[in-house]
Image (spheres, helix red, strand yellow):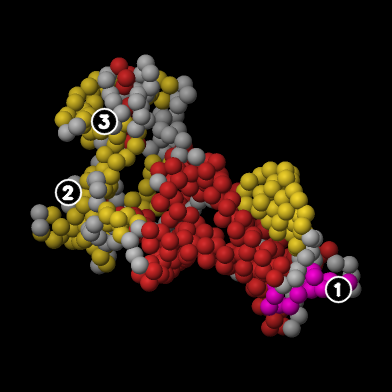
Amino acid sequence: MFVLGLLALSFLVTIHEFGHFIVAKWNKVTVNTFSVGFGKKLFRFKKGETEYCISAIPFGGYVAMAGENPDKLKEGEKPGEHDFMGKSVGARAAIAFAGPFVNIAFAFILLIFLYMVGVQEPDNKSLIIGFVAKNSSAEVAGILPGDTITSINGKETQGWDDFREQIGVSLGANVKLEVHRGGEPLVINVIPQELVIPASDSTSDPIKMGIGDIGIYPRNRVIVRMPPKAGSAAEKAGILRGDTIFEINGEHISRYEDVVRLIDGSKGAEVNVTLMRGGDKVHVKMTPAYSEEFNRYIVGIQMGYVMFSETHLVRRGPIEAFEKTCATSWKMTTSIFRYFKRLFQGHVKVDAFSGPVSIVAVMGNVWMSGFQDFLMLLALISINLGVMNLLPLAITDGGLLMFLAIEKVRGKPLSLKTQSIIQNVAAAFFISFFVFITILDFGKLSLFLK
């Protein structure tokens, strides 16, 4: 899982660096090294003045250009004709802009391809609720299983993913839902509470996700993905691959987290399980056993989700695919700004943000669950990588573009001392932020290791 995610993220960073590389070559800047990966060089060859290599740490790559660090110039020394600093402001800006541009262009082309090949889209935009969690905001507000949500805050629903995003960025805010029940429209106000994932064992703390949740889920089934482990309680009880876990001790099952919670919560006592098998209900009893490996009680099954079919395949012609891609790209591009806005408004917590560890884990998980979903996620991350690098944040490509804009207006660059101070302060901030986000990421790892 992590290897797949790491390869995918590395690919996005590598094509980003390739953008810098190709435009630097176009502007006749000497490129000393183009590396896929970091650290020790495992494989290398030289063509012209450039050394091409594959390095040991497969996390992106880098382009080393001659004369890109003005600090290395001796006092009074001018950059060479083929040095990065020896090129015009426009040429340097083009080289800086090329990396983010390639990420955004790649995502755009990928989306057009996906929309032409065909993607699964909702049969209708309304949301049919399959399960309402106990003591959740939705239950308190009076929402029931089987209700159909047709609008959120006066806007027509656009499928479950869009709904989750809107609820996620509305932590603590009042959200107005239009719900249809038995053909009758109702207006229900609900206040999302922070999404908290229960711990997988009794010794761990719940994981706070920093986003809003109201405790409703689409219609789905929790199934047994693989044959039970040999000698396990599930095998002894006769559970088969493909069985749907319907109830445990009388509690309806809609999420695999519920199974983990109820099995571990039994503390080894016998549990009554109701299965759905070929349209029939099957009742079995199992006695969970404690696992030292997982540090909790288990019955020896692997679980997965099967969604009720509420989607259909939509293929588009080139023009329609282009229009849809423009709309999707704009939504993806602005998503990071929506989250930051909601963060400052207090409707999202900093826990909601993810760093490389979580991104790699999510990409690996999605890749294994469905290649088309993975490609959509790849496009989303590629666009966000491009946009984030265009922000004027000192140590990003956007920061370099900002310095170049100042140089163009002033007719000369900022002093090396001033640039150094700005970059050192920015680097200190981002390193601290990176460490903080990484700590949060490791706290979420159990979500991907169940």
Instruction: Name the residue tied to disc 2.
Output: 146
Q: Give the residue drawn at x 41%, y 51%.
A: 372
- Above or below residue 33? Residue 266 is above
Spatial CA span between label 3 and label 2: 23 Å
Q: Which amino acid does label 1 sit on?
A: Lys
Q: What residue type is labelled 3?
A: Asp
Residue 243's label in the rendered image is 3
The x and y percentages for residue 274 are 21, 28
Question: Looking at the image, is mark 2 or mark 1 earlier in the sequence?
Answer: 1
> Helix or strand or loop: what does disc 1 sit on?
loop
Determine if the magenta segment contains residue 32: no
> Helix or strand or loop: what does disc 2 sit on?
loop
Q: Give the residue drawn at x 44%, y 39%.
A: 447
Q: Quadrant of residue 103?
A: bottom right
Instruction: Name the residue tied to disc 1.
Output: 78
Residue 219 in sight here? yes
In the foreground, 159 or 83 = 83
**Mark 2: few/some/many CA within 10 Å (<14, 14-19, 20+):** some
**Mark 1: few/some/many CA within 10 Å (<14, 14-19, 20+):** few
The stretch of residues the image draws in magenta is 77-92
Q: What residue type is labelled 2?
A: Gly
Q: Depth-wise, is mark 2 or mark 1 nearer the camera?
A: 1
